[in-house]
Amino acid sequence: MTTTQHPTGRVLDNIQWIFVGLAVTTAILLPLTGINAVFVTLLLTIPFAAIHGLRRYGWRRFLTFFAVTFVVSNAFENLSIVTGFPFGNYHYTGDLKLFHVPIFIGPIYFGLGYISWLTASTVLDRADERLNWRERIGKLNVVALPALAAAVMTMFDVASDSQASTLLETWIWHDGGGVFGVPYTNYLGWWLVTYVFFQIFALILAAAQTRDSQPSGVVAPGSLTQPVLIYAALGLTSIPYFIAAEPGTVVDMAGAQWSINAINETMMTINIFTVVTVAFLALTKIARGDTATPY
């Protein structure tokens, strides 16, 4: 990719940093007010990904990423609601649905997916720019990047799903599950579904890079730091719950009783040693200069 700035690059950089600041502030402060910081932070990923994605990949590939994530996620979500595969048996409680899935779920898959994709790419030294089929590293990256990005995205869900479903009942698991009312199949399903749309996008980029011999789009200074910080913010959303403890219990659809404090504390612990740790690793690689060399 080139490092040439867009004519309005400085303004767009500032807007992106504003979204980063909002995400980090929201993640840390909002839980102390009793408001769900996870959902608000997820919403912030959508406009950030739209601006950042257009600049990094150009409008055609950006729209391709949005379409692939939206269509694949909605198809699998509806399939699971009807058949139980791949996530398990559940239903959403909200309105304004596309078939059985709320409209906002698709854009969230897009925003979170974009953040997870670039965080994984950073860990793999800007792997999204090195997918050329003619090179050994490109052949490896075209599989390794989607696999890692899917794991990075699933890490977030491992920590947050029990709170969103068992506590907030944004969706409800019909048979409960061992992870605070969530079945383990949900997390296997998350990895599978996200891997599918990441792999499709990786193949599209690989075909273009092999044909053109170089990536297209704009890489602005600090452009990798921004999505990684937002990913870190998603992990920080649970830490203030340790201060604002919430007593009581909740019962899932299988009749199992769960401690609210235990759910929140476990969510915080998982986030620290998955989401926050991966973000720290990515930021460390940026600071060491591992991602600085253009390819």
Image (tube, grey):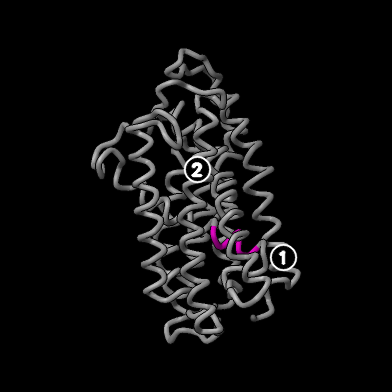
Which quarter of the image is occupied by the N terminus? bottom right
The structure residue drawn at horizontal position 62% and vertical position 31%, both measured from the top left corner, is: 266
The structure residue drawn at horizontal position 47% and vertical position 63%, both measured from the top left corner, is: 201
Q: Is residue 114 left or right of residue 74?
A: right
Q: Which quadrant would residue 155 be assigned to in this image?
A: top right
> In this figure, which residue is indicated by the disc labeled 2?
190
- Main secondary structure of the magenta stretch: helix
The structure residue drawn at horizontal position 52% and vertical position 61%, both measured from the top left corner, is: 20
Front residue of this view, candidates 210 and 282: 210
Query: Magenta stretch?
Result: 117-122
**In the rendered view, would you say 66 is above or below 2?**
above
Q: Residues within 10 Å of mark 2 (few under 14, many from 20)?
A: many
**In the rendered view, would you say 226 is above or below 38?**
below
Instruction: State the SS at label 2.
Output: helix
Q: In the image, which is nearer the foreground, mark 2 or mark 1? A: 2
Q: Is residue 219 left or right of residue 252?
A: right
Q: Which quadrant would residue 148 be assigned to in this image?
A: bottom right
**In the rendered view, would you say 162 is above or below 274?**
above
Front residue of this view, candidates 65 and 163: 65
> In this figure, which residue is indicated by the disc labeled 1?
285
Front residue of this view, candidates 36 and 271: 271
Instruction: State the SS at label 1.
Output: helix
Where is residue 75 shown, x and y percent of the image? 34, 46
